[in-house]
Amino acid sequence: MNEKPALATGIAAPSADGVSAQTRTMLWILLIVYIFNFLDRQIVNILAEPIKAELGLSDTQLGLLAGPAFAVFYALLGIPIARYADKDGTNRVRLIAISLAIWSAMTAVCGLAQNFVQLLLARVGVGVGEAGCTPAAHSLISDSVPAEKRSSAIAFYGLGVPIGSLLGLIIGGVVNDLYGWRIALMMVGAPGILLALVVLFVMREPRHSRTAEAVATARAVVPLSTGEALREIFSSRAFIYILIAASVVAVLGYGKALWTISFFIRSHGLSTTEAGLSMAVVLGLAGAFGTWLGGKMADKYGPRDKKHLLTFPAYGMAIAAPILFLGYYMEDWRVAVAMLIIPTILNSAYYGPAYGCVQGLVQPRARAVAASIMLFGQNLIGLGLGPFLFGVLSDALQPLAGQESVRWVLYGAAWLGLIPAFFFWRASLRLKAELKSG
């Protein structure tokens, strides 16, 4: 079988399946890093009710801790860090290792908080650390795999979202019931510091493995200014549509991730362990399968027609909306959990196709910035607004709905999934004209 040509970065030609052994090792380590990323970010969801009880917080304060406290600093730091990652001389592996050590340490510090302000500041620290991870990781992946494998490779990295959420729900729920929420936070934070050492000493920066010719070529390329990078990125209509869709997905996804757990605890009377294990099936296993399936579908059907890179996310989200609504309507919690599985699969399928398209809509010098803008939208708007807005609406509806106020909020959230479905469909129509070849 003929070998595939070496990538533009000058890395050794990949194996017959398009991905070298070194790259596969990198992908597995990055997946583990991203699992810790979301575990540390999302464990507060399953711990929300015990934290609220001990510290005497309102639903609005809970939403602030889960959303804006993390998201604002994550989003604001993401773009300058991504600019640094895009520079030819930057060691992206070292950047990821340092970021991992910071957010892991701050997660453990969350367990020491004695009041709302202390916990808020610790969550800010988690956001500061995590800002350096994903833009650099997407840039590494895009430089290391062929364009036709990009969606599935980024989807593989994206498995960290559901797997990290799954582990956070299980570990958080069980450890909280046994030892309390403080020990749970410390337990998930500490191992990340050790993992940072593994990243630093095992992973290799692909830029260091380039041929002399590739290095000379890279140095001859004039780097884009921030303004030039932003102009190129936002000149793509497809990118704008994907950004809008992904941001709305994040508002709904982060909001539902926090408040669906509270819904099962309040409306169905589950313990934190029961709610954590139940939602681990939905957010973890179903989410992981959906993320994997979305990448595979994009890689299989995208080469036939570029619009099919986003067909599955667009139509899947439209189908998911009514099923999700019925799931929240059910009175038997077992039926409710079962009915959330299919919508979760369909709503999770966008990650690899969306971020893969974004990497293909810009030249390599702007890839990390493009990813950081997507993350800016998903985190500042999505994580920053979703949990907080859901909490505000729940407090506002309590005079009418009592403890069922969260259920009412989730009814509306289910139907709002039609919005990203529309924008992913609109983006798909632009891909043939706008996607670059490499």
Image (cartoon, rainbow, N blue to C red):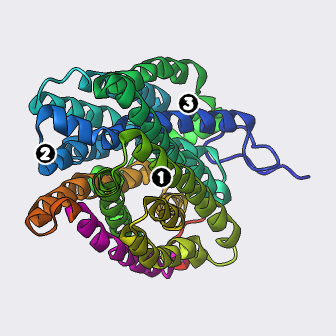
Q: How far apart are marks 1 and 3 (CA)?
A: 32 Å
* Quadrant (top left, top right, bottom left, bottom right) of the C terminus: bottom right
Residue pointed to by mark 3: 205
- Residue at 34% across, 56% down: 268
Please give left or right for residue 404 compared with residue 368 in the image. Answer: left
- Residue at 24% across, 61% down: 406
| Magenta stretch, overall SS | helix
Residue pointed to by mark 1: 283
Q: In this view, does 47 lie above or below 246?
A: above
Q: How far apart are marks 2 and 1 (CA)?
A: 24 Å
Please give left or right for residue 23 compared with residue 218 in the image. Answer: right
- Residue 385 in percent (x, y) is at 21, 57
Q: Quadrant of residue 208?
A: top right
* Element assignment for label 2: helix
Foreground disc of the pair 1, 3: 1
Q: Are marks 2 and 1 in contact (CB under 8 Å)?
A: no
Check disc 2 and give the amino acid type.
Answer: Gln
Check disc 3 and give the amino acid type.
Answer: Glu
- Residue at 59% across, 48% down: 156
| Disc with the residue nearer the chain's start (2 vs 3) | 2
Q: How far apart are marks 2 and 3 (CA)?
A: 41 Å
- Relative to the observer, which residue lies in front, 247 or 62? 62
* Element assignment for label 3: loop
Residue occupying the far right of the picture: 1
- Relative to the observer, which residue lies in front, 145 or 268? 268
Residue pointed to by mark 2: 61
